[in-house]
Structure formats: C-alpha cells, structure tokens
Image (cartoon, rainbow, N blue to C red):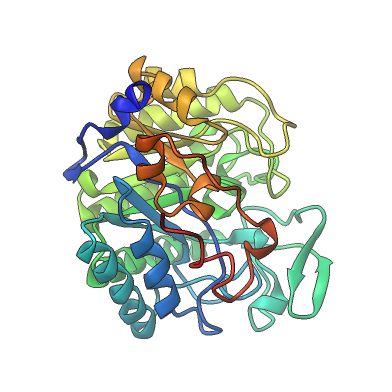
C-alpha cells in the first residue's frame, strides 16, 4: 500500500543493512526449557518472522538466578544456551533475516521461588508492589537486597560475558535492556533508586550503571552493533521518575555521544499512570537511528517515519499473531489479534501455530 511505502525502503542501522524498517520488538514468551536453554520451537518461531528488517530477540538473562517470568526465559551464560541460540540465529539467517539479542538483568523483578531461593538484587531495598507468578502460585514480590558498591563491577562483567556469548551464538548485534523496571532501569529512576553513593542521587549518578554497561558491551561488539532500549514513562514493575523528560534528555544525550547503532524508545506507559512526551527529548538529543515502539498503528508509524520523528518502527503485539507482518502490511491484509492466554505458556499453541498466509 502506498501509504506504507516508507516501511519497505532498505536502511542501515549502525553497520547492519536492513531490508525494511519494520522491527520485531523483544517479546518474552517463556518457551525456553527449565534450564533456560533456547529450544527448537524458538528457532521455528523466530524463523517464521525473519521477513522483519530486524528481530530483537526476547529479554535474555545475562547471569544465573535472574528469572522473573515463571522460570522459562532464555539465558546466555552457559554453553548449552549458546548452542541453543545458535540454532535460532542460523534459522533466521537461512531465511535472510537479521537478529540481535536483548541483554537483560531482572533486578528486583526476580523472585526466590524462580531462582533456587536467591534473593533478588536492586539499587535499593524497595519491593515491587503486587504479586508474581511462580511454580508455587501467585505470591507477593519480595524486598530485594540493595547491591553493595563492590558488587557492581560483577554486574557489568555479567553483561560483558553475555555480549561475548551472543557473538559466539551468531547474533548480528545486541540490545542493552534499560527499560520496564528491570535492573538498569531501576538504577535510573528515582522511585526505585535511593542510593547515596556514586550510583544514586543525581540523574548523572543514576544513569551511571546503564552507561558503564553500554560502554563495556561496546568494547565487545563495537558501537555500530549495539542498541539500547529505554522506557522513561513506563510504570510497569512499580516504576516512576520525578522528571522523566529531564532523565530522557540526559541519558539519550550521553548515548548519542557513544554513537550506538540505535536507540529503542518505548514512548508511553502500559498503564497510563505516567503521561507526557519523551520522544521530543529523544529526537532532539539523539542524532542516530531511533526505533519507535509502543502503541503505534502502522498508519501512525509510517507518518512518524516520514516526518523524521523516528527512523524505524518496532511492533510487538502484532508480531505475536502475524509472523508474516511485513507481507500483510505491504498487501493490505487484515491483522490477526493474538490469544493473550498463550503469551507465557510453554507449548506451540499461540506461538508457532499462527497462519503464515
């Protein structure tokens, strides 16, 4: 369709040549095995979606004892996990696709029942409100343990090891997960970070860990193959910041100086608790590629790309149930709505069984 022609022009993100501007957003689907190893089913799932210009694979544990989604998220800290991911990347590459891995530390969103009784860590000892699903049922989130200053280099090293393992697994790049109330986001936003050391207080201090992790990952991959995802407004996992616009302007400006391949911006709040515009600050502060995400229709996304507000669009919800999303948009075919009851189950239903036509 002519209104969407901007989607189908090739583009370059960092050093990656993409065949179109449609990105598959990272989607946690809980189809790894009980040891957090990627499965053959995951290889099939991602290969089905390889017509995307870029796939950002789901949040992947950089370190052991970091589960926050029922114990079936993938990891990238063991050889078995590397081998499992190799099957995924090979399947995507065989279909002509590009795929990067999202590097993730769950922080206080983790739970002892999912992690062999290990207490989650966070910038400060502040629990997430509400409950979490575990093998023992739905239980309250626990109060995390505040990381000691001497432990933080180990966190950074965990991301470095994961970045190296992602190379060994055949990925085309990596995305640092700095969003949605997980560890790096917890450090950045002042509702979760009450530290008084060099990682707390000012915006500069609160953003320090994200920037240190990003620099360390760049040392492994090169800046042209590293992206960062942010969600300054999202209240998911009990997150809030007193000045999300100022936070966005600072951290994005710093990331711009690092010349990362792309900035992946979630523009709003899942729950509508925090409102406002962070995309203007992002566009003004970041001169490279911005991938927009969250609540865009294909029509709005195309318009935003044409106006230069974003450079590419990441769809999540639509990619669950429309593996051939690129072709459907191009041909004006109606999109299928996903079965939300199958988002976090462990079998093929609602995962690899959506129509490819």
Q: Is residue 199 visible?
A: no
Identify which residue is drawn at 65% across, 38% down: 190
Q: Is residue 246 visible?
A: yes
Determine whether, in the image, residue 57 is placed left or right of residue 200: left
Residue 273 point in image, percent of width and height: 75, 32
Identify which residue is drawn at 50% across, 28% down: 248
Identify which residue is drawn at 48% across, 72% down: 74
Q: Where the N terminus falls, by quadrant?
A: top left
Is 68 placed above or below 2 here? below
Q: Where the C terminus falls, by quadrant?
A: bottom left
Identify which residue is drawn at 63% across, 66% down: 344
Is 143 placed above or below 31 here? above
Residue 296 point in image, percent of width and height: 52, 31
In the image, 126 versus 51, the foreground residue is 51
Residue 120 point in image, percent of width and height: 65, 67
Determine whether, in the image, residue 5 is placed left or right of residue 142: left
Residue 207 point in image, percent of width and height: 49, 40
Q: Quadrant of residue 245?
A: top right
């Amino acid at each position: 369709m002519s209104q969407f022609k901007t989607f189908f022009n090739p583009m370059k993100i960092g050093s990656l040549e993409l065949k179109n501007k449609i990105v598959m957003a990272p989607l946690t689907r809980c189809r790894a095995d009980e040891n957090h190893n990627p499965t053959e089913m995951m290889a099939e799932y991602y290969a089905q979606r390889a017509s995307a210009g870029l796939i950002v694979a789901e949040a992947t544990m950089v370190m052991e004892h970091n589960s926050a989604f029922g114990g079936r998220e993938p990891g990238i800290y063991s050889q078995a996990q590397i081998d499992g991911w190799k099957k995924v990347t090979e399947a995507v590459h065989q279909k002509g696709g590009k795929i990067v891995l999202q590097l993730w530390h769950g922080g206080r969103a983790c739970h002892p029942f999912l992690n062999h009784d290990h207490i989650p860590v966070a910038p400060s000892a502040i629990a997430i409100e509400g409950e979490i699903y575990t093998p023992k049922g739905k239980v309250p989130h626990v109060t995390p343990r505040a990381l000691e200053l001497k432990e933080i280099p180990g966190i950074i090293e965990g991301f470095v090891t994961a970045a190296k393992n992602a190379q060994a697994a055949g990925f085309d790049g990596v995305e640092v997960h700095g969003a949605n109330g997980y560890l790096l986001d917890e450090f950045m936003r002042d509702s979760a970070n009450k530290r008084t050391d060099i990682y707390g207080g000012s915006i500069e201090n609160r953003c320090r860990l994200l920037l240190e992790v990003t620099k360390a990952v760049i040392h492994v991959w090169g800046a042209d193959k590293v992206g960062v995802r942010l969600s300054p407004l999202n209240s998911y996992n009990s997150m809030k910041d007193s000045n999300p616009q100022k936070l966005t302007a600072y951290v994005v400006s710093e990331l711009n100086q690092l010349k990362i391949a792309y900035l992946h911006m979630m523009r709003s709040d899942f729950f509508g608790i925090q409102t406002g515009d962070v995309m203007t600050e992002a566009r003004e502060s970041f001169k490279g590629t911005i991938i927009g995400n969250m609540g865009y229709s294909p029509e709005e996304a195309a318009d935003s790309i044409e106006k230069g507000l974003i450079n590419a669009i990441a769809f999540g919800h639509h990619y669950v149930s429309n593996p051939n999303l690129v072709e459907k948009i191009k041909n004006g075919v109606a999109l299928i709505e996903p079965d939300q009851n199958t988002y976090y189950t462990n079998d093929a239903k609602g995962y690899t069984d959506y129509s490819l036509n």
